Structures are given as structure tokens and as C-alpha cells.
């Protein structure tokens, strides 16, 4: 990461907590042309130092702190990346905003939309940029797919969406990971993998909020009541229907299927592309059976989109661009990112409420 | 179809009705090595004659009849293929069985499971083979996929299924097709495209009946009350969950996604392969993120399965093999095919009941 020193006027990141995912984002900050890490805070100074060493950061350039507070008090920190357990987001995200630090927050952003509102309100009050760390939003594939879905001639009106994200947690994960602990990540699989499913559905619907969530019966919870597997249907007034299933108990799958009146789109790695350099999807338009209905007149086409940087580095780059324009110029926080975080959290709340209320339909009010 | 005359002791088919789909099955009978068409019946003799001419059948070898009854009375007919509107199935399927004709019946097999019971009972009483015309069951790809799903090491325990079959009916279809007419195919899209979704889910579950159906809100019906678009969740006691969506109002899609604890399978042309000669699917097993969660350790693999004959010809071949062993030897009707038809119809009934009862959960009792 020697290249760091050559970056011109980068956004200076502090990392709050040494979660596993912070390793990936630390690398992404290194890869982004407009960001550097200057501080790492942990409840243990030793752990912060070890994180710096283990991730190839320059110990002379990156300050290790034995508390999160110390990172926020560091005047050389412009922005923080917060990968703490969800139950700690409210406290530390608000504290960061109050110290004027731009905020890149891991998902789920909060335990509920009301908590997220308090975070977003603090960001607004203090003029800092907010963005949740949903990396696939920033892959050029996502923009390319959006372009096709927005093409009324080729895709038409959106009718149906299905999203599925699962991975198989090993026994240690299912026993000890923060994502299965009620006091740490109380939303379990819904907050972790389900977040991506909900986001993908909102994305496909161009962020039009569904009006109703009805969870799918069959939720699996652990002994502590944390969701390990669940799903939901989501409904819009105009008849669009989406379903999703998310789970810590099935093999790795990341499926997204989007159907419209004139076209359809599908991919099997929507959250994290199979490979960093190129990402596939297939798109069909105006497809129909052949004359004798023994095959297809034409086939969906496969598209491959290359990425100049990994999607997480593109995320850091975009976040830093926005933060930089506020720090260095007259830029204002971009409201796009908090808005879609809020919508995601609102849908998540509704799915959770439907599960908690015996799979009753729950209205989603924006 | 000159080859017909060289077939040794084939099953002699009569076709009841000249529906569009009968053209495809007539070709399939021609391609199957053990079947021939000997009679075509229509309410109009002229239409029967035209069907024979239009489909390249030998007018000297294939008898045209101006009624369905006449086909059933023809002692030279061993088996009938019945592509009539669903509302006519009960009458003509029972009549065929009573005349000792083996029965290849279009789907949906009946308007409800109780009607199908009467058809199956007639088949049993008269010792004739019953099979519904769900063609993809007979593609070698289906057997190959079944082998993988049954592999406890590579696929593990089934957890989740999603199936989607839609095509975009043009205005003429949505106005006039028998599949949108309450007196002809009262089950609409659920009976037509939904049949395949339900069958695919049962197939993936190795025909274990779900215990409950809860339709997805958002059913679209035409003015006559016939379903144009709908979906459902299906649940099993052990926590398996399936969802499906079927529609006459979205572009052509045939998606099937099956997830297990150790593997996953997906294909985008499960009902009718893109091409006749070869059919793809992808299968992943033991997939996981790479160490830094920036990509996948390994990827799902694509399998291509070649077919010696189109799947509909393989269906005719298998049906004729079973019928032949009864006609020519001591064979008994194979109960596998009526059993899976019955299960499909039971699930279909439950989904319909759930829709009709305001999306209430409906128990499925086998």
C-alpha cells in the first residue's frame, strides 16, 4: 500500500472496530484513488495494532487507538467506516456525525428505521455524508443493468422480482458469530443476507417502496430467537410482486431475477461477483416460443461487465468523492444514499413485524 | 414421416381435437420410434382432414373423424392424446379409459383433484396407462439434475425452491385463447404456466407434498374472473419453503432455482429448453466466499445435456413403452405418472383455494 502516500488530498479514514469485514474495506480504501486509512480504533489497543500489521498498513502512518472515542476525537480523521455490531450503530454513528465525521456504515444500518432516523438526523445536522456499505450498488454492472431495466421498449413494465441470498454458516458461525447474537445483531439473517435481498428488490423497482410486506411462513430461529432463515413477499399497488428468501443455512446463492412485460434479467452473483474483474448477467427482451413451441425463437443474451476496481473500492471512491466535495468545496451531502438506506430499513422493519405478528400483512409507510 | 411405416408394432395414437399444441405432439409421435398416429378426431371432419394435411401426415394411413367419439370407437386406436380444453377432460378422458384407450392427457389434467380422481379411477378400472403431458419430465437433463439433487454429499438437504414461468400473451391471446375463458380453462394461468411451476417444485422435493399453500397477494384476473397472473408459497413441515410466480403478462421466463444445505441448481429454460439438441443448467456445491470475501472460492459449473430426441418425443416414447407392455405383454399401468399428476393437481387446488379465500393458508392433504 505504498501508493497511499502518492494520493492527492485523499479522504482520511478511521476504522471503528476490527471486524472481519473491515479487512476487506481496509483493502478497498487502499485501492481507492482518493482515500487513505489514518486511524484504527478497537476496544483493545493491541487488537488495533495487530489489525494494522495484519493488513499491511503502514504503522508509522496509521494511528492505533484503544477506543472508538479516540478515533472520533482525532482531528486528522475526515470519515469513519463503522463495521460494529448493529446494536452499537446508533451510539457510534451518531457520535461520529456529531464530531463531523462522514459516515460509511455497515449494513444493516440500524436495528430499526426509527434508530436509523436518529443517525440520519445527526448526519444532516452536522452536514456529513452518509452511505451504507452495500457494495454491489457501486459495481458498473449495476448501472448497466439499471439502464436495461429503465428501457421501456426492451424491458417494459416491471412485474416480478425474486431475490435469494444464502450461505452456509458452519457450526462455529451458527454458535458464535455476532450475526446470530440477540444483543449484537438482533436482526440475524434478515439484517445480514436479507438486507441485500430487500435492497435488490428496491433497486429493481427503482426505489418505489412496496406498500405491503407479508413474510413467508417457515422462519427458522435459533434458541435465542435470532432469525437464521426467512423470506417475504412484497407488494405494490400496481400489482408488482416480489419474493425473497435469505438464509444462513443453505449453500452460497445470490440469485436475482427481474421480470417485466417486455424483458427479463437474471444473475447468480448479485451481491459479490464471482470474480473481481468481470461480472455477468443475462438479459432477454421480446422472447417467445418458436412457431411449434419446441424451443425459443431467440435466447437471452449474456453480458459481461468489467470493473476498473473491485466494487468495494468503487464504493469507497464514490463516498470519498462526496465527502471530499463537502470538506474541500461547497458540496452538500448527497441525499440519495440515506434515502435508499431508509427505504431498505423500512421494508426490513415491515418483514420483521410480519414475522413477529404471525405472518400478518404489514403496511409499509414511507 | 415416411419412417412411420417402418416402425415395428408401434402404439397407434388417436388425437382428440386439433388444438395448436396437438401439432407439436403430432410431430413428437412421428419422431418416437414406437408410436404412430392412426386417427385424428375433431368436432368438424373438415378440420380433422386439414390437421392431417397441414401436419404432413399420410392421409391414407391416418383416419379423419368428425367426432371424438368416433376415435374412441376405432378398434385400431391403442391410445389417445387429449389436448382438449380442461373443462372437457373429465368427460373425454373417462370415455377414453372406458374404451380401453391408454391416455396421454394435456395439463392441467382436470379442473380439480376430485375430477382427476374420477379420471384416474377409470384408468385403473380399465387397466390403461395414464400420463400427463408435462414434457420436460422426460428430458435427460431432468434425470441428470435429479441425480445431483439426490446426492446428499453434493446437494445435501433441500431448503428452498423458486420457480417462475411467464409468457406475454398478445391482445388476441388475452381476449380469445381458451386459457382465459372460464368455461374452457377456468384455471387460467395457474392451470397453464402455474402447472409447470408446481410440478417443478414437487419434482425438486422428490414429490414430497407440501403441507400448506399460501398464495401471494397480487393475483391478476380478467373480467371473467380467470387468473392471468398469480403466485404462491408452499411449505413443508421440515422447514422447506418454495415460492412460484406464473403469468400471461410478463416476457417469456422459465426459471427454476433449487437450494440445499450443500449445493444449488438453477436453469432458465426448465419447461422448454432453449434448443432441442442440448439443454443447460448450472450446479454449485460447497460454494463459499474467498478468504477476504471479495469473490467466490469456486464457481457453479455449467452442465450441458444432449437429447437424442426432443423431450416431447421422449415423452411419447416412454408412454408408448408402458402402453405397449400392457397391450403386448403382461405389463401393468405404471402408477408413478398418475401419482405425480394427482399431487400436482392437489397443490394447484390448494393454491386456488388460498386465492379464493383471501390468501388464507390452505392445508394440502394427500
Image (cartoon, coloured by chain):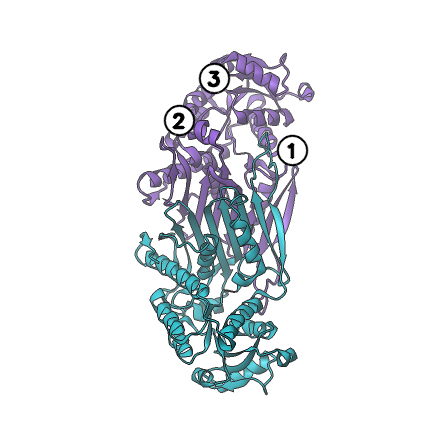
Chain colours: A cyan, B purple
Between A24 and A2, the one nearer to me in the picture? A2
Residue in the foreground of this view, choosing between A235 and A327? A327
- Residue B170: image location, x then y, percent: 49, 33
- Spatial distance from mark 1 to mark 2, Cα to Cα? 33 Å
Q: Secondary structure at mark 1?
A: loop
Q: Secondary structure at mark 3?
A: loop
Please tell me whether residue A169 is drawn above or below residue A73 in the rendered image.
Answer: above
Callout 2 secondary element: helix
Label 3 Cα neighbours within 10 Å, binned few <14 / some 14-19 / many ≥20? some
Answer few, some or many: residues within 10 Å of disc 2's Cα (few below 14, many 20 plus, some between 14 and 19).
some
Mark 3 and mark 1: Cα distance apart in space: 31 Å
Q: Position of residue B317 (x, y in %)?
A: 60, 29
Q: Position of residue A227 (x, y in %)?
A: 40, 62
Q: Is residue B312 visible?
A: yes
The answer for which chain carries disc 3 is B
Instruction: Tell me the quarter of the image containing the C terminus of chain A.
Output: bottom left
Mark 3 vs 2: CB contact within 8 A: no
Q: Nearer the viewer, residue B263 or B276?
A: B276
Q: Residue at x 50, y 20 (%)?
A: B17
Q: Which residue is mark 2?
A: B118
Determine which residue is flagged by label 1.
B309
Are labels 3 and 2 assigned to the same chain? yes
Amino acid at each position: 500500500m505504498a501508493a497511499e502516500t502518492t494520493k492527492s488530498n485523499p479522504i482520511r479514514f478511521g476504522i471503528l472496530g476490527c471486524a472481519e469485514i473491515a479487512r476487506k474495506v481496509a483493502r478497498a480504501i487502499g485501492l481507492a484513488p482518493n482515500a487513505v486509512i489514518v486511524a484504527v480504533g478497537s476496544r483493545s489497543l493491541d487488537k488495533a495494532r495487530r489489525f494494522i500489521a495484519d493488513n499491511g498498513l503502514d504503522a508509522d502512518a496509521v494511528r492505533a487507538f484503544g477506543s472508538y472515542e479516540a478515533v472520533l476525537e482525532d482531528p486528522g480523521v475526515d470519515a469513519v467506516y463503522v463495521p460494529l455490531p448493529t446494536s452499537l450503530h446508533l451510539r457510534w454513528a451518531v457520535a461520529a456525525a456529531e464530531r463531523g465525521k462522514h459516515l460509511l456504515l455497515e449494513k444493516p444500518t440500524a436495528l430499526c428505521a426509527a434508530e436509523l432516523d436518529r443517525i440520519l438526523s445527526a448526519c444532516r445536522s452536522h452536514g456529513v455524508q452518509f452511505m451504507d456499505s452495500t457494495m454491489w450498488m457501486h459495481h458498473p454492472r449495476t448501472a448497466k443493468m439499471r439502464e436495461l431495466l429503465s428501457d421501456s421498449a426492451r424491458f417494459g413494465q416491471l412485474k416480478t422480482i425474486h431475490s435469494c441470498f444464502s450461505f452456509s454458516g458452519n457450526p462455529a458461525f451458527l454458535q458464535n458469530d455476532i450475526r446470530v447474537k440477540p444483543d449484537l445483531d438482533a436482526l440475524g439473517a434478515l439484517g445480514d443476507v436479507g438486507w441485500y435481498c430487500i435492497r435488490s428488490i428496491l433497486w429493481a423497482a427503482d426505489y418505489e417502496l412496496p406498500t405491503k410486506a407479508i413474510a413467508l411462513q417457515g422462519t427458522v430461529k435459533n434458541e435465542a430467537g435470532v432469525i437464521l432463515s426467512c423470506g417475504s413477499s412484497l407488494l405494490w399497488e400496481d400489482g408488482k410482486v416480489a419474493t425473497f428468501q435469505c438464509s444462513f443455512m443453505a449453500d452460497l446463492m445470490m440469485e436475482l431475477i427481474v421480470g417485466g412485460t417486455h424483458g427479463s434479467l437474471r444473475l447468480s452473483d448479485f451481491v459479490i461477483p464471482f470474480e473481481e474483474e468481470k461480472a455477468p448477467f443475462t438479459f432477454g427482451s421480446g422472447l417467445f416460443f418458436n412457431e411449434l413451441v419446441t424451443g425459443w425463437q431467440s435466447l437471452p443474451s449474456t453480458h459481461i461487465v468489467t470493473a476498473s476496481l473491485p466494487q468495494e473500492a468503487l464504493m469507497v471512491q464514490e463516498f470519498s468523492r462526496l465527502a471530499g466535495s463537502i470538506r474541500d468545496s461547497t458540496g452538500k451531502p448527497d441525499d440519495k444514499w440515506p434515502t435508499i438506506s431508509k427505504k431498505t430499513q423500512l421494508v426490513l422493519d415491515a418483514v420483521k413485524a410480519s414475522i413477529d405478528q404471525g405472518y400478518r400483512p404489514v403496511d409499509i409507510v414511507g
